Amino acid sequence: MIGPPRTAARGFTLIELALAMAVAATAFSALVALFGVTRRLSDESRLATRTESEHRANLVAVAALLRDADPASLTGFDESGVASRPGFQRFDGLVGADVTRTAALELAWEPYPDGGRDDRGVRLGQVVLRRDGSVERVLARRVPEGGFGVTRSGRTLAVRVETFHASREAHLTGRTVDTFEVCLRN
C-alpha cells in the first residue's frame, strides 16, 4: 500500500449539501409565508374587534340620548317618518307639577373638514349632538355620508348607524351597519 490508511470518517458530497440547502430554503419559505398569513389574520381580527367595539359604543351613545326624548318635541321627520337630522328635547325634571325640558337638541351627520373618504369613495364624517346650533359632543365617528338616519313609528325610533374602519396600511377595511330601536320612555 502506498500512503496512509483510509479512515471511516467521510464528509458530505456537493449533492448532499445542495439537497440539504434546498430543503432548508423550502422550509424557511414556508415559515415566512405562514408568518404573513398569521399576521394578516391577526390584523383582520384586530380590525373587526375595534370596529365592533366602537360601533357598539356609538349605538349606546345615540340610544341613551333618544330614550329620554319628549315625543311631542320630535322634529325633522318627513311624511314617511324618516329623519337624517332629528331634533328633540329631553325631559329634564320637574319643577312643582311642571315638566322641564332641555334646550332644543339635534342629531346630525357632519363631514370631516379634511374631506376623508371610505373605500367606496363616500365622504366620511361623524354624528354629532348639537345644542343651540353648536356641537356639544361627537356621538359616532367614521360614519359614511348617508350612514345615519332615524325612522319614527309611534313612540318607537329605529336608528340606523353605519361605521367604517380601515387598518393603518389601508389594505383592510371593515364596515358595520346596525339598526336598533329605542322606545321613548315618556
Image: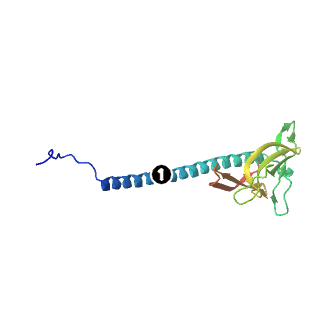
**Image spot of residue 119 (x, y percent):** 69, 58
Look at label 1 and name its amino acid: Val
User: Which residue occupies the extreme bottom position in the image?
Assistant: 80
Total residue callouts = 1
Q: Position of residue 114 (x, y in %)?
A: 79, 49
- Please tell me whether residue 146 is drawn above or below residue 134 in the rendered image: below
Q: Nearer the viewer, residue 177 or 126?
A: 126
Residue at 44% x, 51% y is: 31
Residue 186 in view: no
Q: Residue furthest top?
A: 96
Question: Residue lying farthest left?
Answer: 1
Residue drawn at x 74%, y 53% as measured from the top left? 143
Front residue of 10/101: it is: 10
Task: Name the residue that disc number 1 marks.
Answer: 32
Depth order, front residue of 113/60: 113
Q: Is residue 135 visible?
A: yes
Q: 10 Å neighbourhood of mark 1: few (<14), some, or many (≥20)?
A: few
Residue 28 image position (x, y, % from top left)? 43, 51
Residue at 68% across, 56% down? 177
Secondary structure of residue under mark 1:
helix
Tell me: 52 left or right of 118: left
Residue pushed farthest front? 2
Percent coordinates x, y for residue 10 in the rendering: 23, 48
Q: How is the image coloured?
A: rainbow
Position of 44 with respect to 91 (left or right) is left
